[in-house]
Image: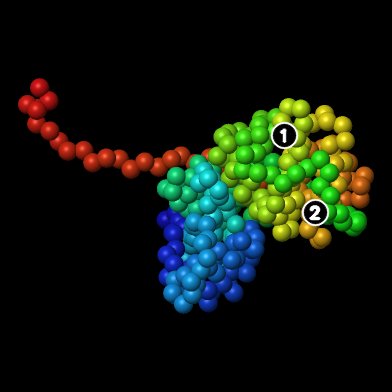
Amino acid sequence: MSEMRAEPLSPIDTATLWPQLGRLSTEIVATRAGENLLLSSGLAATGLTRLPRIPRTIVVGVKRALRYRGVLVARELAGGAAWEIVSIRIARTIDDETVGALAAGAALEAARRNGRILFVRYPESSPHATGLQRAGLISYREEHLLALPRSGRSAETGAFRPAARSDRAGTFRLYCKAVPQHVRRSEALTQQEWRAVIDSFDCEKEYVAEGDRGIVAWAGFGERECHLILEPGIEGLSDAALDLIESHGPRHGTLVLGDDQDALHDRAAERGYTAMGVRLVCARRLAQLQSLKEVSPLPAESLA
């Protein structure tokens, strides 16, 4: 039996996929961005509408004859160093072979487009973990999701201010100090890769707080989720950051904390944050694909 492979889909293939999406009812990775990007690809193929600029995408599928067994959508993250899988859908309830082929196909396409890392997030108890691991996506961090408590909202930001473009280097230095080495090694060895990590958070607003040694705290707010990075050992910084989350975060959003942020997790629990679950963050380092130059044979005389 030949090895199953996922093939990249053209915009026309993406448009013809829509009638079959009802069959692909098992959602392994399902973000709003994934559905929107697949829809945008289909609309672009029809030529009936002018779309706003969308990120570069990879769409790969596994099919037998004309029937799809699965489809995957990945998007390029800021800076171009990394790609993120934002949607995986399959026809069967469990199909590790198809899941592994889709993820491996996405990794190959990302490498062809000069990507260095492929990311994916999925629930800790997912029955599809084996298929993703087959494609070399290794879990390196847990993310704990905490529901924000109901509290009064204020326009005050305290010690925080809106982040500017000039804060990128300082934020990366904070990341290098606050995040464990095994996490940095897997996701962001350079500032360009750190830009990709922030983009994967889908932040619409960013805030920073400064101390004597530069930026000591960073907060990112998306439509549904909030993220924090704090320099350890600074008294009162955790409460100031949680005050900002409660006053500026989405009303029905969640705070996402890594498994290395135990002190912040405990303080959030004391303030009434409710645990909602855990998801795994996985990554695969990609080899850069280089096409070989054509070699022409030369007569021995010319070498002399």
Q: What colour scheme was applied to this rendering of the protein?
A: rainbow
Disc 2 crowd rating (10 Å Cα; few below 14, some 14-19, many 20+) is: some
Task: Give the position of the C terminus as an image quadrant.
Answer: top left
Q: Is residue 121 visible?
A: no
Q: Which mark is residue 226?
A: none
Residue 247 appears left or right of 133: right
Q: Residue at x 78, y 42 (%)?
A: 160
Q: Position of residue 267 (x, y in %)?
A: 88, 41
Q: Position of residue 72 (x, y in %)?
A: 54, 60
Q: Whole-Å distance between the Cαs marked 1 and 2?
A: 20 Å
Q: Given the image, on which type of amino acid does mark 2 rest?
A: His
Q: Mark 1: which secondary structure?
A: strand
Q: Which quadrant would the N terminus be assigned to in this image?
A: bottom left
Secondary structure found at label 2: helix
How many labels sit on residues? 2
Q: Where residue 92 sits in the image (x, y, percent)?
A: 60, 66
> Residue type at mark 1?
Ile
Classify residue 266 as left or right of residue 134. right
Q: Which residue is mark 1?
A: 215
Residue ID for mark 2: 248
**Residue 181: which quarter of the image?**
top right
Is label 1 in contact with label 2 (beta carbons under 8 Å)? no
Q: Please tell me which residue is depicted at 62% across the width and 69% down the height of the picture.
A: 25
Residue for point 65% across, 44% down: 164
* Circle 1 crowding by C-alpha within 10 Å: few under 14, some 14–19, many from 20: many
The residue closer to the viewer here, 191 or 129, is 191
Is residue 52 visible in the rendered image? The answer is yes
- Rendered residue at 49%/75% (across/down): 49
Measured as percent of width and height from the top left, residue 33 is found at: 61, 61
- 94 or 260: which is nearer to us? 260
Q: Quadrant of residue 242?
A: top right
- Whether 34 is drawn above or below 130: the answer is below
